[in-house]
Image (cartoon, grey):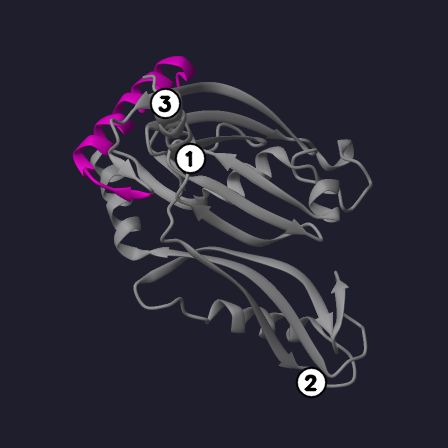
Amino acid sequence: MKTSLNKNICISLSLGSTHTSLIAACYENKPLSAQSEDQFQSEKDSSRIQILGAARINNNGAIKKGVVSSIDAVTASILETIDEVERQSGVEIDSVRACIAGTAAQFDNHVETCSVKGEEIRASDLERVSAAVRNQKPPMGYDFIHMIPSSYSVDGKHGIQNPIGMQGSSLSIMHHRVFYPQADLHNIVRACNNAGVRVQSFAFEPLAAAEGVLTKDEKEFGCISLSIGAHLTHAAVYLGNIPVYSKEYPIGSHHITKDLSIGLRTT
C-alpha cells in the first residue's frame, strides 16, 4: 500500500491463541545518495519506520495452536482491530500481511544443485538453479509460505555471495523453506475476506519475531530466538545470517501459569 513515491504503508496482522493484533506502519525509503556506501547495509537501516496505529483484541480462543476453531469469531476480532487502527491512523485498510503460527507447520533446508555450462559461472546458471528451486512442490496438502535463500556453493565451497565469473563445475544454493497446511491457510484467508481485507502474504511467527529483535551480527554469529506466547513457544535458529531452524512448540505461558497455580494451590 503506497502513499507517495518513497513512502509505503505496511499493515501486519498477527493471529495468536488469545489475541488478534493489527499494526499499521509507514516506512520511507531514503534516496540512494543518502544511504551508506556499505553494500551489505540492512534494509532496516535504510528505512525510517513510523507506527501509525496498533490494536490488540481478545479473540476468545478462536485460534488454538494455530488452528482456527471459529471463523466467525476470528472475523469479528479482525474487524475490531481494523476499526481501531483505521480510527488511529486515518488509513483505509484493504489488505494485510498475516503472521501465523501452528505446530502443524513444517520446515526443511533444501539444497538445489545444477551443473555449470562452460568453464565459468554465468547469470544463466544462477537463473537455472533458482528456477529449479521455484519448481519444487511442497508436500501434499501443504503450501510454501517462505523460501529464504542462503549463499551459494561452488564445487562444495560454501559462503559465496556472488559466484558469477568463478570457475566451477557445480553450483548449489540452500533455501530455508516453511510449509503450512492448505486447509489452515484457507480458513485464515476466509476469515480475513469476511472482514473485508485481502491477505497479501503470510509470515511464520518464529521468523517474524526473530527478524524483529535480532541484529545482523547476532544472526551472522549464530543465535536462537525464543518467543513465548500463550499456548505456543516460537523458536528460530540463525547461522551465517540465515535461518536454519524454525519450529513451534505446544507449550506457552498459559501452561506455566496453570502449573504454578496447581503447585502453589492458588488461582
Can residue 175 be seen here? yes
Tell me the residue that label 3 is attached to. Answer: 261
Q: Does dot 2 land on a helix, a strand or a loop?
A: loop
Residue type, numbered disc 2: Lys
Residue closer to the observer: 36 or 243: 243
- The stretch in magenta equals 66-91
Mark with earlier residue (2, 1): 2
Mark with earlier residue (2, 3): 2
Residue closer to the observer: 91 or 233: 233
Real-space Cα distance between discs 2 and 3?
66 Å
Tell me the residue that label 2 is attached to. Answer: 117
Q: Is residue 177 magenta?
A: no
In the image, residue 235 lies at what x, y percent? Answer: 53, 44
Residue at image position (31%, 40%) is: 198
Real-space Cα distance between discs 2 and 1?
51 Å
What is the crowding at mark 1: few (fewer than 14 residues within 10 Å), some, or many (at least 20)? some
Main structural element of the magenta stretch: helix, strand or loop? helix
Can residue 163 be seen here? no
Q: Is residue 183 above or below residue 1?
A: below
Residue at image position (75%, 62%) is: 159
Image quadrant where residue 114 sits: bottom right
Q: Is residue 5 above or below residue 234?
A: above
Q: Please, which residue is most extreme toward the bottom here?
A: 118
Q: Which corner quadrant holds the C terminus?
A: top left
Tell me the residue that label 1 is attached to. Answer: 252
Q: Is residue 74 above or below residue 104?
A: above
Residue at image position (72%, 74%) is: 122
Q: Does dot 1 land on a helix, a strand or a loop?
A: loop
